[in-house]
Amino acid sequence: MVRFIVLKSFSIHYPLSTIYYLLILTACLLLLSGCWYDMRQQAKVKPLESSDFFLDGQASRPLLPDTVARGHLDLDKAMYQGMNEDDTPVDAFPIEITREVLERGRQQYDIFCSPCHSRLGNGQGMIVRRGFKAPPSFHIDRLRDAPPGYYYDVITNGFGVMYSYASRVPPEDRWTIIAYIKALQLSQNATIDDVPPDQRRKLEELGQ
């Protein structure tokens, strides 16, 4: 059975289903009215375009002093600068040292560090065989005793003829590299007493 509704002022009979349809259609039209591209079509200038609004003719404006890029608010001084609050190099790692961290450090070290420092860290990398000056070995007393924060500062800002790797190696990977360097230093200056007992016999057998 089709139900009707009577609009007395006009004496017109409409099926109730038609009224529902018109209401739904009206609601859809109201929703669609908010889908125009007004913001896309508004007057604006795009980055690196020219503009006669500014005296220098450029649409892009200089960054304000102390502007920080999104996602780069690095407030942890130890993590992102390798320094204590008194600007001395940190003695401890700001990350947990795990096997995965050392594996990542070895991978990054082999890519970025070994061409100069060699895979052993003795400063006899590929560049030395090509006539370049050898960097100091990581196994000298000065560098063996250097705190982790010292290495972080060198990787970040460069040292001597070594340029900065800040744009190439993110902070987390810098710490993994430093952890691996410390592991290299231990490996090249360890004694049999430093080896865990379960591994010591294997080394002794290899030595025979």
Image: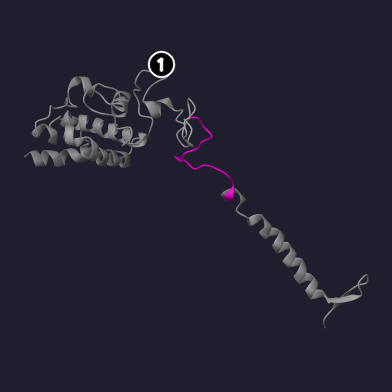
Question: Would you name the residue on which mark 1 appears?
Answer: 86
Residue 125: in sight, yes or no? Answer: no
Q: Is residue 173 magenta?
A: no
Q: Is residue 134 above or below residue 30?
A: above
Q: Which residues are magenta?
A: 41-55
Residue 28 sits in which quadrant? Answer: bottom right
| Element assignment for label 1 | loop
Tell me which residue sits at (26%, 34%) in the image: 180
Image quadrant where one finds the C terminus: top left
- Residue at image coords 25%, 29%: 163
Q: Amino acid at mark 1?
A: Asp
For the point 28% across and 38% down, the residue is: 105
Binning the other alpha carbons within 10 Å of mark 1 as few (below 14), some (14 to 19) or many (20 upward) gives few
Say left or right for 78 vs 141. right
Q: Residue furthest front?
A: 52
Pick the residue in front: 46 or 1. 46
> Is 150 positioned to the left or the right of 140 in the image?
right
Chief secondary structure of the magenta portion: loop
Give coordinates of residue 62: x percent, y percent: 47, 30
